[in-house]
Amino acid sequence: MEPTLTVHDLTRRFGRRTALEGVSLAFGRGVTGLLGPNGAGKTTLIRVLATTLAPDAGRVAAFGLDPADREQRLAIRRRLGYLPQSPGAYPHFTAFELVEYVAILKEIDDRRARHDEVRRVLAEVDLGDRAHTKVRRLSGGMRQRLALAQALLGDPDLLILDEPTVGLDPEQRMRFRALLSRLGASRTVLLSTHQTEDVTTLCERVVVMRTGGVVFEGTPGELAAQAAGQVWLTTTPPEGTFWRTPDGRYRTLGHRPPAAVPGEPGVEDGYLLLLGGEQVAA
Amino acid sequence: MNEWHVPDDLRAAYLGGGLPDATAMSVEAHVESCSACQAAFPADGAWLETSWAAIADVVDRPRPRPLTRFLTALGVPGHVAVLLSATPGLARSWLLGVAGALAFAVFAAHTADRSMIVFLAVAPVLPLLGIAAAGARADSLYEVIAAAPIPRTRVVLLRALAVLVTALLVTALAARALPDYTAAWLLPALALSGAVLALGTRIAPHHASALLTCGWLAVVLAGREAVFAAPAQTVYAVVLVPFIYLGARRWNRL
């Protein structure tokens, strides 16, 4: 199947700092997770893909269109839903007014159609009963859901979400995952996250970034397999970094400590090992 | 048991809309509880659904903000009015700042030997900060707006226009309170507004605004009344068009 979104040899610098270096990726239908520590270049990549930041070098194509061309960029934006890392809000607006405002920015000019669409997306994120509450009176989790609602306006073919699960409680996160997995069945969803749990439960594909480059691309299972033979369980605290498991044993990654038994590798283990020792120690 | 049903002639009169309100309500009350009469009345499911949705929209939609209502009353299309009502430059703090600066300038004109130089110097720079905010990253929805398909030029120019019109109206009102009425501030205000739009894509809009404000005040300090004389006014009128064109073109590329 033709990928929805491709980037080739992408480079972006901010002054002397290189945020992206030679990144090449392709995204098709389904949910892809973008994992990486702070400063890995996730948000820069997300902003380039969402057409809000131009790369210094390299090519980007979405639906076969080139965002460097103004008309094609607008055509991409008509099919895009975007949740930025800091989505912002006008606190004196109600939830309805804020989403309606974004609906106007998305060119839904007919009032009835716009109102229906606003109600639909507010219901999608379970905020239908808060439509007329001022944004400043909403909790952090509700504001995050409100930001997600604006991204869903117009039923976009491409959803780009930068850390969408921040601020959500476990129940909201579960609902959010259900919503995204439903949406991912028929469109391309790209989300950046710090939560390996999001990747495990939601993503068909995962990309791990570090210092502006891609260090892994594959399925969550393949990421977990990166840690095969490197996850250990001990009954006494081993040297180096470890954490206590619910059954009272100690879990560590890397070299086998004395008297250790192998543990089942998970996505988080593979991710931490990919990032290297300093991340495991952090 | 109720054996009475709406007769054909009464039903026809009801459907034709020719019944008095009280009779129509009696018919409706009966039909609500009589399945035989319900079946006799024609029903269009799609029409009903659309009608209910329209009623629900009227009941459920939020009351427009005062500014939105005001703009709509002036004939501005609804979606443009909503867009303008969120203009960051039209914040209360900016309006208070504009009013305060104008009050000071009018007061100075009355106390300083009827000299209007303070008013003329201050009035043209009042819209700048508001216009700078029209496309600024300081807008908390900047990133969302940046990814929206609506052309950025349209948003920035609409907002800039809203700020400019507001500032000009307030300034024109304040000018009525001057010892001698003058409109010599108008063309400099328009030229500086165009300049901040053109410069605001090259450097941060608030920097552009600060730079132009300082530059303008320096020019007024050096040139005094000559800055508002006819030759200078011609210059402002001439530079206005290319400034706006340049500004619009640059915002268009973003």
Image (tube, helix red, strand yellow):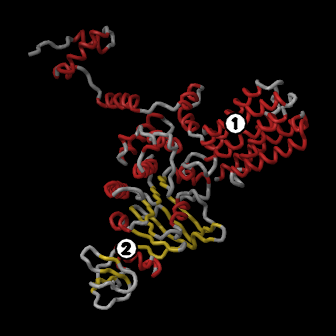
Name the foreground residue: B133 vs A81: B133
The crowd level at tag 2 (other Cα within 10 Å; few <14, some 14-19, many 20+) is: some
A44 or B120: nearer the viewer: B120
Residue type, mark 1 in image: Val
Q: Residue at x 35, y 76 (%)?
A: A224
Q: Output the chain of dot 2.
A: A
Task: Report the front residue among B149 and B208.
Answer: B208
Residue B75 x, y percent position in the rendering: 59, 27
Q: Chain letter of disc 1?
A: B
Image quadrant in which you'd find residue B6: top left
Mark 1, Cα crowd under 10 Å, few <14 / some 14-19 / many 20+, is many
List x then y, in percent, for residue A73.
57, 54
- Tell us which disc is closer to us: 1 or 2: 1
Disc ID at residue A268: 2
Note whether A104 is above or below A144 in the view shown: above
Q: Amino acid at mark 2?
A: Glu
Q: CA distance from mark 1 to mark 2?
A: 56 Å
Quarter containing the N terminus of chain B: top left
Asked whether the viewer can see residue A152, the reply is: no
Q: Residue at x 26, y 77 (%)?
A: A248
Using the image, determine if residue B8 lies above or below residue B84: above
Q: Horizontal and vertical percent for residue B215?
A: 81, 48
Residue hosting label 1: B98
Give how far across and how far down residue A104 sits, in percent.
Answer: 52, 41
Q: Residue at x 56, y 36 (%)?
A: B85
* Residue lying furthest front: B111
Secondary structure under the numbered disc 1 in the rendered image: helix
Q: Residue furthest left?
A: B1
Q: Quadrant of residue A264?
A: bottom left
